[in-house]
Image: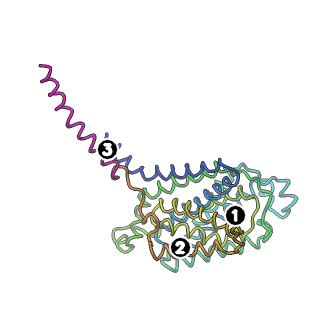
Amino acid sequence: MTTRAQALGTQIWPLVPLLGLVAACSLLAFVNNVLEREVTLAMIYLILVVSLYTFTGNSGVASFGHISFMAIGAYTAGLLTISPLMKLAVMSQLPDFIERAHWGSAPAVLLGGLIAAVFAAIVSLPLMRLSGLAASLATFAVLNIVFIVSDNWTQVTNGSAGIADIPTATTALGATGWALLVICAAFAFQATRSGLRLRASREDDIAAQSIGITIVRERRVSFVLSAFIGGVGGGVFAQFIGSFNAQSFYLSLTFLTFVMLVVGGTRSLAGAVIGSLFISLVSALLVRVESGVSLGLVEIPSRPGLREVALALIMLATLILRPTGITGGREIPALSRTPVRRIIDRFRTNRELNTPAREAEEQCNVS
């Protein structure tokens, strides 16, 4: 029983420090209002990067279209939470069932994720038969299709004007809760048989096929789950920002999420979490410098585009100097394998070995 419990603890251990790190970062939201906004955005980005990792990290196929699932989730959650009177006044062309709908925050977010997953299940039928560069370009085509449709479908998305007056129900604490949930979901998936088979195909697709793994099916499962997570991230984002249009879900955000995953490490959940938090911090600092800052006697003028250039340089440096990212493509090692744990175990062993000897010596002294 003890051995089984230790094995279970070793399997779950990589998840524990990740959840602790995210929870610790969320405490910064209580310092001041500016940090609360930054923390909330960081948690939303984390959800999106975990969504990207769930497919790209496990399958080895780069997806440039995952922000399209975020767009679907955002529009769904936004339209469901705006009051019917506001929709009637501003978006009078909406279908009746959307115009009358008025959902709560969490159900709208979950439905946005579900619709994104259904959309992913449909497009995965042809896409997952592709591999390599062809599959990556196909996902980028999906991103463009969703962008063009959402930018021109005036009856539902209000076209390029976008939608506004969405109740801002997302707080730093709420976004952190969603982030913790999706981390657990991604960790659970990669430990399932489907996740392990998919990762085996990532390492060697020919060998995986030779032992009976259906790569197309495993990729579809991962693609749909990652789309659901991306849709949830979109719903949380919509209820944080309050208003958006199709341009909010296009190349800029696609680039940002890829930088986060590459810098952290594409092949581990720890890389997705650590990379997203690290780049969120760097991005927030670069935005401040980009708008111009004053450092006493030194004043730095505004430099539009500085953030994108700096993030691109960071990604290039990572690809050249450390292609496997900050984490080296590995999860956080189990506690039983760390030097500290080995020292503790050695101390306990020595104490147990010395206890009978001490007892015998004491008995001799008494006699």
Give 205 or 40, whichever is nearer the viewer: 40
Amino acid residing under circle 3: Ile
Q: Rounded to the nearest whole Å, what is the CA distance between mark 3 and mark 2?
A: 39 Å
Rendering quarter of residue 126: bottom right
**Residue 358 highlighted magenta (yes or no):** yes
The residue that mark 1 highlights is 296
Tell me which label, 2 or 1, sits earlier in the chain.
Answer: 1
The reply, left or right, for residue 299 in relation to residue 270 is right
Rendered residue at 67%/75% (across/down): 305
Question: Where residue 151 sits in the image (x, y, percent)?
Answer: 75, 72
Q: Helix, strand or loop at disc 1?
A: loop
Amino acid residing under circle 2: Met
In the rendered image, the residue lying farthest to the top is 367
Give 298 or 101, whichever is nearer the viewer: 298
Q: Residues within 10 Å of mark 1 (few under 14, many from 20)?
A: few
Please give the range of residues in magenta: 339-367
The residue that mark 3 highlights is 344
Rendered residue at 65%/74% (across/down): 306
Rendered residue at 84%/62% (across/down): 91
Amino acid residing under circle 1: Gly
Q: Quadrant of the C terminus?
A: top left
Please tell me the numbered disc located at residue 315: 2
Tell me which label, 3 or 1, sits earlier in the chain.
Answer: 1
The reply, left or right, for residue 233 in relation to residue 218 is right
Give the overall secondary structure of the magenta segment: helix
Q: Rounded to the nearest whole Å, what is the CA distance between mark 3 and mark 1?
A: 50 Å
Number of labelled discs? Answer: 3
Q: Helix, strand or loop at disc 2?
A: helix
Q: Is residue 126 above or below residue 232?
A: below
